[in-house]
Image (spheres, grey):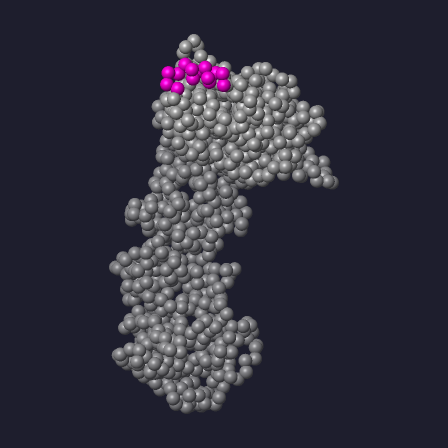
Amino acid sequence: MDNCSTASMFLTDSLELELGTEWCKPPCFSCGIDNRGGGNHFSGESYLSSGALKRLILNLDPLPTNFEEDTVEIFAIQWVTETALVNSSRVLFHLFRQQLYNLETLLQANCDFGKISTLHCKADNIRQQCVTFLHYVKVFIFRYLKVQNAESSVPVHPYETLEAQLPSVLVDELHGLLLYIGHLSELPSISPGAFVNQNQIKLFPPSWHLLHLHLDIHWMVLEILHMLGEKLKQVIYGHQFMNLAGDNLTNISLFEEHCENLLCDLISLSLNRYDKVRPSEALASHHCPCSCIKELWVLLIHLLEHRNKWSLSESFWNWLSKLLKTFFEKSSDRKRPSVPVIQPRDPLGFSWWIITHIASLYQFDRHGTPDEMRQMESNWNFVEELLKKSINVQDGILEEQLRMHLHCCLTLCDFWEPNIAIVTILWEYYSKNLNSPFSISWLPLKGLTYIIKSPLSMLEMVKACCCDKQDNDLYKSSSSYTIFLCILAKVVKKAMKNNGPHPWKQIKGRIYSKFHQKRMEELTEVGLQNFFNLFLLLADVAEVEDVASHVLDLLNFLKPSLVTSSIIWKGQVAFLLMYTQKNLDIGVLAEKCSGAFREKAKEFLVSKNDEMGQRQTLWTLLSIYIDGVQEVFETSHCLYPSHEKLLNDGFSMLLRACQESELRTVLSFLQAVLARIRSMHQQLCQELQKESMDLIVQSSLSAKERHLAAVANALWRHFFSFLKSQRMSQIVPLSELADAAADFTLLAMDMPSTAPSDLQPQPVISVMQLFGWDDIIWPQVVARYLSHCLQNSMLCEALSHTGCVSFQALTVRSWIRCVLQMYINNLYVPDDLFIDINPGQAVEKEYLEQLAELTRLLFKLSEIKNIFSKAQVEYLSSPEDPTKALVLFFEAVGITYGNLQNLSDKSAMVTKSLEYLGEILKYIKPYLGKKISSAGLQLTYRIMGILVKSWAQIFATSKAQKLLFRIIDCLLLPHTVLQPERELPAPMLTAIQKSLPLYLQGMCIVCGQSQNPNAYLNQLLGSVIEQYIGRFLPSSPHVSGLVQHPVLLALRNSAAVPLIAPLKKCIVQVIRKSYLECKGSLLPPRLASILAFVLQLFKDTSVEISEVQLLLPGVLKCLMLVNEPQGILSRIML
């Protein structure tokens, strides 16, 4: 049987395939059998999958391999196959009704799990017997029923007499059978569910079998009546019954009556399901309780359309529409009051719902296989009537209902050929209600507000309406007006594809005619939104330039207010974006939009100090334009001269009027446009480098290059001049300033000729000098800017070949400044907040990360790598701490210099080293003012101390000594230090105490390494020692308190510094001259502490005779003047 049912699916129209003689199980309705049709939607034993419908329509043997024996068993009785129906038709139908009764009695049994197996077997056996009998009737009619010649004068055999009466008998019996079984909707209970036993076999209750047997009977009665008509080619009258109109019953009248009743039953079943359907789930909720009901609908569609083709009956849609129309008739006006269909609570919604689902069944072919390419018969006449009822104002239109109706209509537009009439009907309604938001109070729209936020989202919404496949959740995500736009788009696209531009002209005329000056002035903000959505959609599916031109003409009627201006700007920019996406010249639109932008930018500049309300409104408009222009550049395939119009002097005025948050928006726009221009230029360069290019292509590329240059010129003119003027202020956000400057640097590299004249002839160097190497620029800007530049390998390579030999040195100088000035922002914070905290916590995290990134990139420069290589110290490929990296760099430079042997190399190294430092004292000067930063002072004194010590040999040269003198004067011997009565700020004193050993050791080395003995340098060293021996003496003369004295610490590390001996000599001389001199009989101040210091000095170092000779006279003289020498000495010894 399986082989037979499967093979029947692949029968050709001629059905000449040999099937053998094996008995095939006759087809029947079944939704309980697994699909064996290889993806078919119906059971393999169904009328569709088995090929039964195809055989019926082609007038072929219903079951070519069945009923081939001489006898056949029907209702457990053996009958002669070729004569049984003639001789015993009434007996057989009586037995059939008896079996039906037996099945109905099984419904009274208690159907629990223990009895279900027995009940299932009994019910299934009864059903199979009944189905077999009806198939036998069909086979008998096809094979054995002969057409009688009424005019023949030959004597007739009694069998022939009975055979001649058989068609009439069948009509009577079939009619009686239909009366016996009644309507589907009258069945006591329909339970399509099944039990599943341990072997995973489905067991169905008797009610399931009864329902499906009724379906079999209803369908096969139609088959039999159709076959009788096809076989006899004449009207067959019944002998026992008359129809409802009092006329004699015929096969045709019975077919039509039964067909109508069956459709009414199916509609009633659908109504029961519709009562439980929500409008938002209408299309997702099917109208059929099981696949067998669905199959019956498909069978009826094919049979009625086939009969209509040969004018045997009305088409399926006519049948259905005629029945659905009765829902809208008053009870007194109904032509057929006996039609057994219950009145729905929502006849209009139900009609939309049922007709949409039925329309989808037209895609199934005669085998039940869906075929999306299959031509579907439409029912637009009835749908147009439904549409008129849906938008009938007098009946009260509810948005929630209208959405469902239009969603159904949209689905029908997918199935059927385009229909302009439905667009006309809908437009008559929506043209009068454009100002309505079409909202549902209890259902917020998903992803859509009444006023769309941006031009791009407006355009995307319109594009979504034009998609071939719509969102299944359209009810919740879109208003009814949006669904109307989807319908409009689909109809226009389909109609133009089938019939050219003529349908579009019809629709355009109807839509355009509704807009005039008065109507435009009546539009609210919501109305304008709907207006733009409509015309954007028309532009997308039809003639964009014609539609855009008409929109501009209509907008000229308006005198927009501040409220409506926003939506008008969005709409115009949306058209601009559409032009760009379609690669059209934006000239006219660009001129209009940019002109309006210039005017609003001027108002924005004038209203800089006015009330915030007006300013905010103006900014809303300006930001719409900015976002739109950015999208235009990012989506443009190529640039036209009109693109330059979008970048007019309105931006120059706007930039001057912007506050910080607004500047961020504008500069973000600038960076996006610069990136796009550079990307397009690189693509253009690649195309220009191709070989074998004809003159036309070359000319086109040259034109594109000119257009790019024009846009770049506009950017330099309107944006760079502003950035240049604001590079030292804090009005512009520093990070955005650095990013934009870096982008202009890359633009100058790619397109140097576009830069203004004041940056020529080397625009890249000029821009870097302005934003990367100028000492007056904020370090946050410099660090971020140089990071961007160093990340670009092409830029670094270009700078290395431009003759700018100081590129790396200048970059190193800026890096040193950025590290030294990392705490410059803390100068306005109270000093006591930073004394005891981790210095890294006193720096902004963002700046510290940026500085670390700059350090990492800087250490990849060839010059830095070369220094570390020559110094033979560990190279940090990825330094994390900028301060530590700077210390390593200073030490590496000092070591590298010390390893040089050639005088010319040493001289060059000194020059390069000084170039690295630049005006380093200017970098640290802010920390030395009245505003104190503890962390900044600690960093300054420590780094500069390391510099003095590491570069001692460099500072010993005549070129560098001046800088050393300035460092000592500035940091160690400022005016405040030379005034003993003045106390140094505590943070500064702490920083000097921690770093003083570095300075003393470095100065001592310089003194020993100096090419020419320098008295001034020795004098400076003595002055420093003189000042800080006393400042760091403990308050009480305890030797233990002198262990951490910075001067002594400088000597304690003498093993690491071999040239430290002169330092001790200088210390001894300073003590003798400045701390042991007695004025008359007066002792030197703080004598005890000085003597304790001398004692600690000799403890830490070896005592030289010359040192004793210098100090002993002074010490003895002081002791002679002491009244209690034992007390003093004892205190010193402590």
Q: Position of residue 601 (x, y in %)?
A: 45, 25
Q: Is residue 571 left or right of residue 244?
A: right
Q: Is residue 262 left or right of residue 17?
A: left
Q: In this rendering, does residue 573 appear at all?
A: no
In the rendered view of the protein, which quadrant contains the C terminus? top left
Q: Residue at x 44, y 70 (%)?
A: 42
User: Relative to residue 1017, is residue 622 depicted above or below?
Assistant: below
Q: In this rendering, does residue 72 appear at all?
A: yes
| In-front residue for pair 531/922 | 922
Q: Position of residue 959 (x, y in %)?
A: 63, 19
Q: Position of residue 94 (x, y in %)?
A: 33, 84
User: Relative to residue 871, is residue 1035 depicted above or below?
Assistant: above
Q: Residue at x 31, y 78 (%)?
A: 113
- Residue 244: in magenta span: no
User: Relative to residue 365, is residue 900 depicted above or below?
Assistant: above
| In-front residue for pair 423/891 | 891
- Residue 1122: in magenta span: yes
Count of marks, rendered view: 0
Q: Quadrant of residue 1121?
A: top left
Q: Residue at x 35, y 49 (%)?
A: 402
Q: Quadrant of residue 833?
A: top left
Mostly what secondary structure, the magenta segment? helix
| In-front residue for pair 1017/389 | 1017
The part of the chain drawn in magenta is 1112-1125
Q: Residue at x 41, y 54 (%)?
A: 472
| In-front residue for pair 978/506 | 978
Q: Position of residue 964 (x, y in %)?
A: 57, 20
Task: Looking at this view, name the residue that lies furthest to the top.
Answer: 1080
User: Relative to residue 706, is residue 1021 depicted above or below?
Assistant: above
